[in-house]
Amino acid sequence: MIASASRYVIGGGVIVYPTETVYGLGANALDEQAVMRVFQIKKRPISQPIFLAVSNFEMLKNVAHVSEDDLDLLLQILPGPVSILIKKKSIVPDILTAGSPLVGIRYPDHETALRIIDLAGPITSTSANRTGSPPPTSAAQVSPEIKDRVDAVVDGGKCRFGQPSTLLDLQKREIIRPGAGLDEVMKAIM
């Protein structure tokens, strides 16, 4: 299932995949058309950015400007249920970030998600729900309107945290959205 889901992503498709927080919609984060499809499936305004997910620090450095200080902090909190806001590199399409120079990045602590990202490269990281609806925490909770519009749903069981990630502005060392992983982030930025 992981190999075929990865092939869909590489071919421009969209999948639903598990993470430790909630189920996400995954598409090639560097392919504008694939990213646009995610916006359409979610019925999300393109003025609202979508995060991307990486599976290692090397991949993170390929898409974002990471200083040594940033890396020291990130090694304390990633992989984990945390998203970071960081300056993007030009390889990241503007449609993903709604034109912002910053990109939201997840490095999930979930074996299935990491294996898919390893095979497919950086993928989109946004909850597998219509904008405004509650995010699914199991494959069974993914709504028919999402399931019917994606190429595959990868069932990885129930999400460990069942709530969105904490969002950290890495430059300002400021928490923008508290969520899963909040305590670890607080300790790391103190």
Image: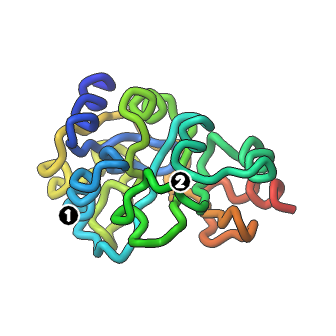
Question: In the figure, is residue 180 to the left or right of 164?
Answer: right
Q: In which quadrant will I find the N terminus?
A: top left
Vertical placement of residue 93 versus 159, above or below = below
Q: Give residue 156's quadrant in the image.
A: top left
Quarter of the figure with the C terminus: bottom right
Query: Callout 2: helix, strand or loop?
Result: strand
Mark 2 lies on residue: 105
Name the residue tied to disc 1.
40
Q: Which residue is drawn at the image coordinates 81% and 60% (left, top)?
A: 189
**Three-letter code for the amino acid on which mark 2 is drawn:** Ile
Q: Residue furthest left?
A: 148
For the residues labelled 1 and 2, the Cα–Cα distance comes to: 21 Å
Circle 2 Cα neighbour tier, 10 Å, few/some/many (<14 / 14–19 / ≥20): many
Q: Residue at x 53, y 53 (%)?
A: 105
Q: Quadrant of residue 138?
A: top left
Foreground of the two, 128 or 32: 32
Residue in front for this viewpoint, 30 or 35: 30
Image position, residue 36 (x, y; %): 24, 60
Tell me, yes or no, whether the two marked residues, 1 and 2, touch with CB atoms within 8 Å. no
Residue 65 drawn at (x, y percent) = 62, 53
Residue 187 x, y percent position in the rendering: 83, 56
Q: Amino acid at mark 1?
A: Gln
Relative to residue 87, is residue 175 drawn left or right?
right
Whether 41 is drawn above or below 160: the answer is: below
Residue at (25% x, 29% y) in the render: 7
Residue 52, given in percent of the width and then of the height, sits at: 45, 51
State the SS at label 1.
Answer: helix
Q: Residue furthest front?
A: 90
- Label 1, residues with CA under 10 Å away: few <14, some 14-19, many ≥20: some
- Residue at 62% across / 37% down in the picture? 57
